[in-house]
Image: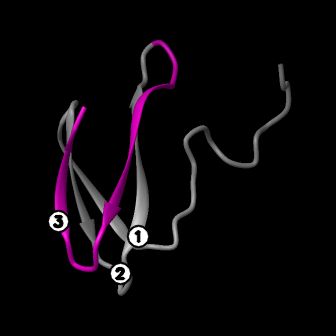
Amino acid sequence: FFKGTPLYPFGYGLTYGNVEEKWLDENTVELYNKDGMDTDYSVLKFKTEPHKELVDFKKVFIRVGEHITVNF
């Protein structure tokens, strides 16, 4: 296992779009594409106890100005 300090935290990622996430509860997130282009976006769901762990993910396509809800 890696013993050093990572450059980026677990779950850190880059997207070319400007997507805002608004979590309504632990299983539902609203996504807003505030960019000028359509984009693919990966929504990552984590649990943080006892440590940060990826639980699920979904890849979605969001059009310009679109608002969608993703349920896990």
* Residue picked out by circle 1: 39
Look at the numbered discs 2 and 1 and tell me whether their residues touch, using CB distance below 8 Å: yes
What is the distance, in whole Å, between disc 1 and disc 3 at their CAs? 12 Å
Q: Identify the residue position indicated by label 3 in the image.
A: 67
Kindly identify the residue that appears in the image at 36 percent across and 76 percent down: 38
**What SS does tag 3 mark?**
strand
In this picture, residue 6 sits left or right of residue 46: right
Q: Is disc 1 placed on a helix, strand or loop?
A: strand
Depth order, front residue of 40/43: 40
Image depth: mark 2 or mark 1 in front:
1
Instruction: Specify the amino acid type for callout 3.
Output: His
Q: Report which quarter residue 57 is drawn in.
A: top left
For the C terminus, give its image quadrant: top left
Crowd band around label 1 with a 10 angstrom C-alpha radius: few (<14), some (14–19), many (20+) = some
Q: What stretch is highlighted in magenta?
A: 50-72
- Tell whether position 68 is magenta: yes
Q: In this view, does 16 lie to the left or right of 20?
A: right
